[in-house]
Amino acid sequence: KLNRGFLDLKIEPPARLVQLIGTHYRLSLNNSAGLTSSVPVGDYRITAMFKNGPEQAEVRIRKGDNSPVFIRPRLGGLRVSSEPAGAKFRLSTEGGNGFHADGDTPALISGIPEGKYQLQAWRGDYMKELAINVRKWETNAVIVAFEYGELEVHSEPEGATFSIGGRDAGKTPIRVTELQPRIYRIGVEKAGFARVDMEVEVVGSRLITIKTKIGGAHV
């Protein structure tokens, strides 16, 4: 007769399949949240099958002792925010295979397997990419900052047509917001005056002010 001890197994959330395998004893359970039972002494491997894959634990049962085991999936959560809000995003595993999620900020994603991920977030054609490490049993958080710049243009005389990137934006004086950080080609023109063209570098989170005098009147 084999000596016995007690196994106190708790599984959260319930696993669709649980396998308990030891030298002298085996047991399979379906849709189980665990069990408390007397089992023969010895070393056991417990495998719990969840939606996102298996989780395993090992335990040694000793004569007369109670051995507690707690198994839960190594999942975490991710709170995705952006400044400004309203960005679209895609979260995927490195390499593109496996878990992925899409949505709009702000968002809370749950049930993410522990590991490294790539986060892409965009507003229009302004995209940012970040490496994310999701830790198990935590609600991780990330804020994607879209660092727009602003451009304020004054001309003498006023009322000139201002263009940026080849597109008319309005009349001077004018303030253009939510510009991606980069170099832009701008122009200022008014009937009867020589056109002014220049390049300007817009820097994130900064206001750049340009004051220009349009060339003298020409025939």
Image: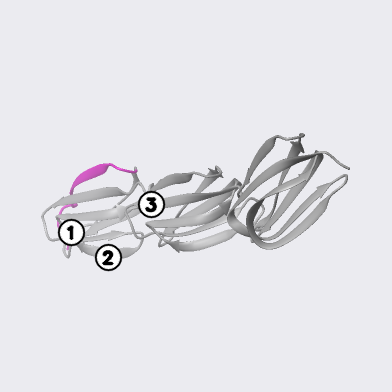
Q: Classify residue 213 as left or right of residue 103.
A: left
* Residue behind mark 1: 193
Residue at left offset 11%, top offset 56%: 158
Tell me the CA gap for discs 1 and 3.
Answer: 47 Å
- Residue at the (45%, 63%) spot, across then down: 103
Q: Nearer the viewer, mark 1 or mark 2?
A: 2
Residue at image coords 67%, 37%: 66
Tell me the magenta residue range: 204-219
Report which quarter residue 106 is drawn in. Answer: bottom left
Label 2, on which residue?
168
Q: In terms of secondary structure, where does tag 3 sit?
A: strand
Kind of residue indicated by mark 3: Ser
- How packed mark 2 is, by other alpha carbons closer than 10 Å (few <14, some 14-19, many 20 or more), is few
* Residue 79 spot, x, y in % from top left: 43, 51
Closest to the camera, between mark 3 and mark 2, is 3
Residue placed at 64% from the left, 53% from the top? 34
Q: Residues within 10 Å of mark 3 (few under 14, many from 20)?
A: many
Which quarter of the rendered picture does the C terminus lie within?
bottom left
- CB-based contact (under 8 Å), mark 1 and mark 3: no
Image coordinates for residue 149, horizontal then vertical, percent: 30, 47
Q: In this orientation, which residue lies closer to the viewer: 171 or 217? A: 171
Is residue 192 shown above or below 34? below
Write down the residue under mark 3. Answer: 81
